[in-house]
């Protein structure tokens, strides 16, 4: 976990362990998530959706309990 100012992000390095077999980075954007997703889509970014246990998809947002994930 890293922090710069008020932004925190997590870098997940995978050595082909677990379900995610690729490096990943995550960060929190709070209530700005949907707006950021809309802006990314307007610039041609493809948002992927995955069928995962205990997660529902609402529009482009994956919802896991109280977390919203893109």
Image (cartoon, rainbow, N blue to C red):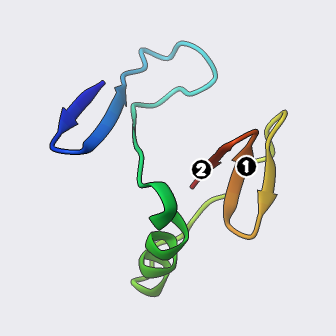
* In this rendering, position of residue 3 left or right of residue 44: left
Q: Which residue is most to the bottom?
A: 42
Q: Nearer the viewer, residue 34 or 50?
A: 34
Element marked by disc 2: strand
Report x, y in % for residue 64. 73, 40
The quadrant of the rendering that contains the C terminus is bottom right
Q: Residue furthest left?
A: 5
Question: Which quarter shows the N terminus?
Answer: top left
Say which of 49 and 38 sits in front.
38
3D distance between C-alphas at marks 1 and 2:
6 Å
Q: Is residue 44 above or below residue 50?
A: below
Residue 12 vertical placement versus 38 (above, below): above
Closer to the chain start, of discs 1 and 2, is: 1
Note whether 21 is above or below 60 in the view shown: above
SS class, disc 1:
strand
Task: Name the residue located 84 percent from the left edge and 33 percent from the top edge.
Answer: 53
Which residue is depicted at the point 30% across and 38% down?
A: 8
Q: Nearer the viewer, residue 9 or 7?
A: 7
- Residue 3's x, y, as percent? 21, 34
Task: Establish if 35 lies above or below 9.
Answer: below
In the picture, the disc for residue 63 is: 1
Pointers 1 and 2 in contact (CB under 8 A)?
yes
Q: Which mark is residue 69?
A: 2
Residue under the image location 62 percent in, 59 percent down: 48
Q: For the residue carrying disc 1, how many other residues have a C-alpha within 10 Å: few (<14), some (14-19), or many (20+)?
A: some
Q: Is residue 31 left or right of residue 24?
A: right
Q: Residue 5, position in %: x, y?
A: 15, 44
Residue 62: percent from the left, percent from the top?
70, 52
């Amino acid at each position: 976990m890293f922090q710069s100012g008020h932004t925190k992000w997590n870098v997940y390095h995978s050595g082909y362990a677990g379900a995610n077999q690729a490096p990943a980075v995550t960060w929190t954007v709070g209530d700005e998530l949907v707006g950021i997703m809309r802006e990314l889509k307007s610039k041609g970014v493809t948002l992927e959706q995955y069928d995962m246990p205990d997660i529902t998809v609402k529009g482009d947002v994956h919802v896991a309990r109280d977390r919203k994930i893109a």
